[in-house]
Amino acid sequence: MTALALRFLYIGLFSVGGGLSAVSLIQAEMVDRLGWLTAETLVDLMAVAEMTPGPLAVNAASFVGMRLRGLPGAVTATCACILPGCVIAFLMSRANDRLGKSRRWRRMLEVLRAAVTGVILSGALVIGRNALGSGEVVLLSAGCFGAGLALYRRLKPSPMGFMVV
């Protein structure tokens, strides 16, 4: 249980920018380093995590924790994942109150935005690489995507109704 908490503390601490930035960290830790998930399971996990309410990294933590240690694992992984974000948000809020007008502070936030963009792009590339594993799957996925997009554009249904179907 300690290893699970430490891994998701790490993911929560370094997944700056949101869920997609966490994907590459989850891949590196859960698939490559520890073997707790396969690449295919990670893609399935990301699909389910994106469709359920809440942040992707938190949903992933809940899923992995439940899979490995049941309900106590899900609670532990989820709490470990959100703790760094809560602490960082509190500290950034306090710093912004004091340094909001400082040129250096604003410049640091601009640099941070650029770094976050790179991390999110890395996560998108991990998902793409894992999802496009075999040629048959790629063709089937592309066909489903194209048909779904065409149908959505033509019928213009409500997004919620379309996801249910």
Image (cartoon, helix red, strand yellow):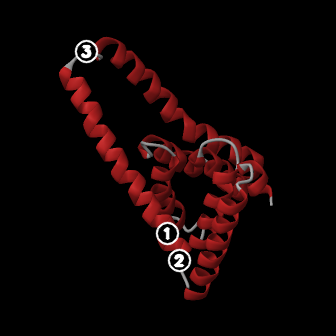
Q: Quadrant of residue 102?
A: top left
Q: How crowded is mark 2: few (under 14 residues within 10 Å), some or many (20 or more)?
A: some
The percent coordinates of residue 52 (x first, y second) are: 70, 48
The percent coordinates of residue 74 (x first, y second) are: 70, 46
The answer to whether marks 2 and 1 mark residues whose Cβ atoms lie closer than 8 Å is: yes
- Mark found first going from the N terminus, 2 or 3: 3
Residue on which disc 3 sits = 101
What SS does tag 3 mark?
Answer: loop
State whether residue 33 appears in this view.
Answer: no
Amino acid under disc 1: Gly
Q: In which quarter of the image is the C terminus?
A: bottom right
Amino acid under disc 2: Leu
State whether residue 57 appears in this view.
Answer: yes
Which mark identifies residue 128? 1
Q: Which of 23 and 71 is in front in this view?
A: 23
Q: Nearer the viewer, residue 37 or 164?
A: 164
Residue on which disc 2 sits = 132
Whole-angstrom CA distance, mark 1 to mark 3, is 40 Å
Q: Residues within 10 Å of mark 3 (few under 14, many from 20)?
A: few
What SS does tag 1 mark?
Answer: helix
Q: Residue at x 33, y 40 (%)?
A: 113
The percent coordinates of residue 91 (x first, y second) are: 40, 22
Q: Which of 141 and 10 is in front in this view?
A: 141
Q: Which residue is drawn at 71% across and 50% down?
A: 159
